[in-house]
Amino acid sequence: MQIVYHIGANCTDQDRLLKSALKNAETFAALGVKVPGPGKYRSLIRETIQSLDGKPPAADTREILLDAILDDDHCNRLVMSHSQFMCVHRRVFEHSIFYELAEQKLRGLENLFPDDEIEIFLGIRDPATFIPEIFGDSPVDSFTDFMRGIDPLELRWSDLVARIRTFLPRASLTVWCNEDTPLIWAQLIRELAGVDSLTKITGGFDLLSAIMSAEGMHAFVTYLKANPPQTEQQKWRIIAAFLEKYALEEEVEDEIDIPGWTQETLSQLTANYDEDIYRIEHMER
């Protein structure tokens, strides 16, 4: 069986990807793909890993979990999503390491299904907006305490990606930029489910409708009907053009309020992120 974990990261899509996938649960189930509701597995998976405390699971753990998650149904691919699979917000910089808990948590997820194919899906985000939002959503009052001595300018997603590839060598890893999700939303839904690009889905524009005005969405849909894109790249260009004109400012612009951060800080963080993306793109598959 293929076991798919969408592990966030924290403060990326706010469960929107899961919600869009759930809209297609019946369609996907007919293709052998199950997308259970999060109540079926989030607490169960967390509590099972915690109870094992790093020890190997019993031989029947996999079947017990699948029976509980799938209600005795069968499938070829199981999709589970939780932006806090690696850790809660306040622990992202635990022990002065970016996602220090990733190895422990992801090994735990893998060990629950030792003989299955494991796929990891990870959305990453510009630290210029990621750090302020995750700090703002955490219960920690002091930014200095939250960062645990890590210099934001030194943060690199590529380090996390490299570590995941090292401690989960048998797992496949799909990484994308959260900033690109309005363009690739339908593609993400299909890839998460493991279906081909021609499979009809519902909710392919869910994210777009959340960040674009009603007027813009109407104009966009009308344009697509009159001018169907011939390629994904062509569709991305169309989406980008309509977003430039009709995006809701309050949905696409982030308020940054970190002590000591200047426009120069934000620009440098984003420049570092662009370089980091290039590094990830050129890692060995």
Image (spheres, rainbow, N blue to C red):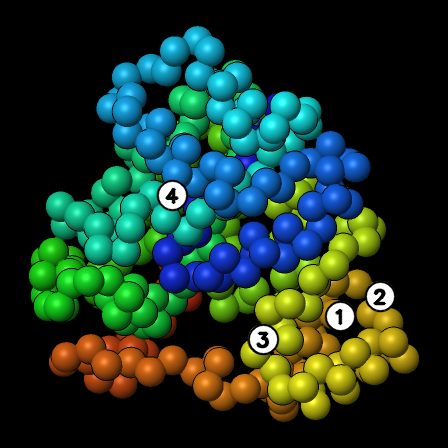
Mark toward the viewer: 3 or 2: 3
Judged from the image, the secondary structure of the residue bearing numbered disc 2 is loop
Q: Which residue is mark 1?
A: 234
Q: Which residue is mark 3?
A: 210
Q: Position of residue 118 (x, y in %)?
A: 52, 30
In terms of sequence position, does the residue under pointer 2 or pointer 4 come before the other?
4
Labels 3 and 4 touching (C-beta < 8 A):
no
Q: Position of residue 77 (x, y in %)?
A: 64, 32
Measure the C-alpha gap from mark 4 to mark 1.
34 Å
**Above or below for 263 versus 101:** below
Q: Which residue is mark 2?
A: 230
Indicate the amino acid at tag 2: Gln
Indicate the amino acid at tag 3: Ala
**Above or below for 103 versus 12:** above
Indicate the amino acid at tag 1: Gln
Q: Is residue 234 left or right of residue 274?
A: right
Labels 3 and 2 touching (C-beta < 8 A):
no
In terms of sequence position, does the residue under pointer 3 or pointer 1 come before the other?
3
Judged from the image, the secondary structure of the residue bearing numbered disc 3 is helix
Labels 1 and 2 touching (C-beta < 8 A):
yes
